[in-house]
Image: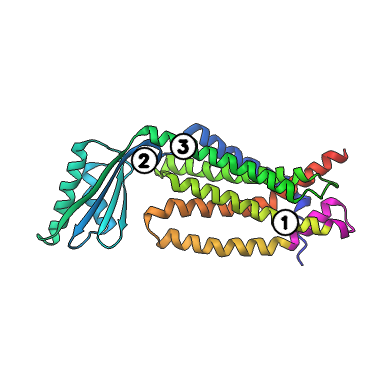
């Protein structure tokens, strides 16, 4: 078994986390997130192609002259295609249909398009989605706090069970803020927008982060009654026992996510990128943030 002095160097890890947290929080408060049409309102147009269907890149190139804001092109089934964009006027609607007609007839004059639906999402619906998303995250955090407190209820020495729960919540809050803050930076400099799938990614990251932290905490709980070391060294031994497992588990997931980012479609890239960033940060925090916080609390108690 490895014997890395992780807890003994906790000030370094907590310092790195604090610096990254402050930078990402500042970016989030200064620039905010670049919101997609799920949150700002916009239009959804579904087209059926009778004949050959153009690729996503061909469609985006064909519509480039219209300068559509937040354009998302998504193939649906074998013949259909869905377009999302912020403009809602009828003039833009008709201009898109004209451009698509021109695009398909370049290859074959017999190719046609057939409009399946055209819907507009108002800003009020987008605002409602934002509020519901925030409430969803709040209730998830509350439920996790209660659950971890209950699971570790029989541990009272030297750190109370609710401190395990709060340490995990602090770690996952750290993960969520850094993940969202990175997307604030990406939105500012690379125009990457977020949609409702991003909220699902953040909730997934929160769940993954807590799962990883609980694995470490559970090993601490097992080691405490039989350990000959003090609390600090017992936590360090527990971390070393679970370190390779945590890294290997996360790396296998990250390999899959990176391959999807590289080879997958543009429509899911933001969602998968959020997962990849969040899982990487979550693995870091479960090792270098959650457990060191427990030791810091124990040190304060003894003083």
Extreme residue toward the bottom, this view: 1
Residue 41 or 246: which is nearer the viewer?
41
- What label sits on residue 37 in the rendered view? 2
Extreme residue toward the right, this view: 228
| Residue 81 x %, y % | 27, 54
| Residue 1 x %, y % | 77, 67
Please check the rendered image and state whether residue 144 is part of the magenta-colored stretch, yes or no.
no
Label 3, on which residue? 130
- Which residue range is magenta in the image? 224-241
Mark 3 element type:
helix
Distance (Cα) linking label 1 and label 3? 34 Å
Name the residue located 64 percent from the left edge and 51 percent from the top edge: 210
Distance (Cα) linking label 2 and label 3? 11 Å
Name the residue located 24 percent from the left edge and 60 percent from the top edge: 79
Q: Compared with residue 5, is residue 37 higher up or lower down, i.e. above or below?
A: above
Label 1, on which residue? 216
Location of the C terminus (image quadrant): top right
Q: Residues within 10 Å of mark 3 (few under 14, many from 20)?
A: some
**Are circles 1 and 3 on residues that touch, CB within 8 Å?**
no
Residue 36 visible:
no
User: Which picture quadrant has residue 166?
Assistant: top right
In the picture provided, is 262 more to the left or to the right than 204?
left
Residue 85 or 19: which is nearer the viewer?
85
User: Which picture quadrant has residue 77?
Assistant: bottom left
Q: Residues within 10 Å of mark 1 (few under 14, many from 20)?
A: many
């Amino acid at each position: 078994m490895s014997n890395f002095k992780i807890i003994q160097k906790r000030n370094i890890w907590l310092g790195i986390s604090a610096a990254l947290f402050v930078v990402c929080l500042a970016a989030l408060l200064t620039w905010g997130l670049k919101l997609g049409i799920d949150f700002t309102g916009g239009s959804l147009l579904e087209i059926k192609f009778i004949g050959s269907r153009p690729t996503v890149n061909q469609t985006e190139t064909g519509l480039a002259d219209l300068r559509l804001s937040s354009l998302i092109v998504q193939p649906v089934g074998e013949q259909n295609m869905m377009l999302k964009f912020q403009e809602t006027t009828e003039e833009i609607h008709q201009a898109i249909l004209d451009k698509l007609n021109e695009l398909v007839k370049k290859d074959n004059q017999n190719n046609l398009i057939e409009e399946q639906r055209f819907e507009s999402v108002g800003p009020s619906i987008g605002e409602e989605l934002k509020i519901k998303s925030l409430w969803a995250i709040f209730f998830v955090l509350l439920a996790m706090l209660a659950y971890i407190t209950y699971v570790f209820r029989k541990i009272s020495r030297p750190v109370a069970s609710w401190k395990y729960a709060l340490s995990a919540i602090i770690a996952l809050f750290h993960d969520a803020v850094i993940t969202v803050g990175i997307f604030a930076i990406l939105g500012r400099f690379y125009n990457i927008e977020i949609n409702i799938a991003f909220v699902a990614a953040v909730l997934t990251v929160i769940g993954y982060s807590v799962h990883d932290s609980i694995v470490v905490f559970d090993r601490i709980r097992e080691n405490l009654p039989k350990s000959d070391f003090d609390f600090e060294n017992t936590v360090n031994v527990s971390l070393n026992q679970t370190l390779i497992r945590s890294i290997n588990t996360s790396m296998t997931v990250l390999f899959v996510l990176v391959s999807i980012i590289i080879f997958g479609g543009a429509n899911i890239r933001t969602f998968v990128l959020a997962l990849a960033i969040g899982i990487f940060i979550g693995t870091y925090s479960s090792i270098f943030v959650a457990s060191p916080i427990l030791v810091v609390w124990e040190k304060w108690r003894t003083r």
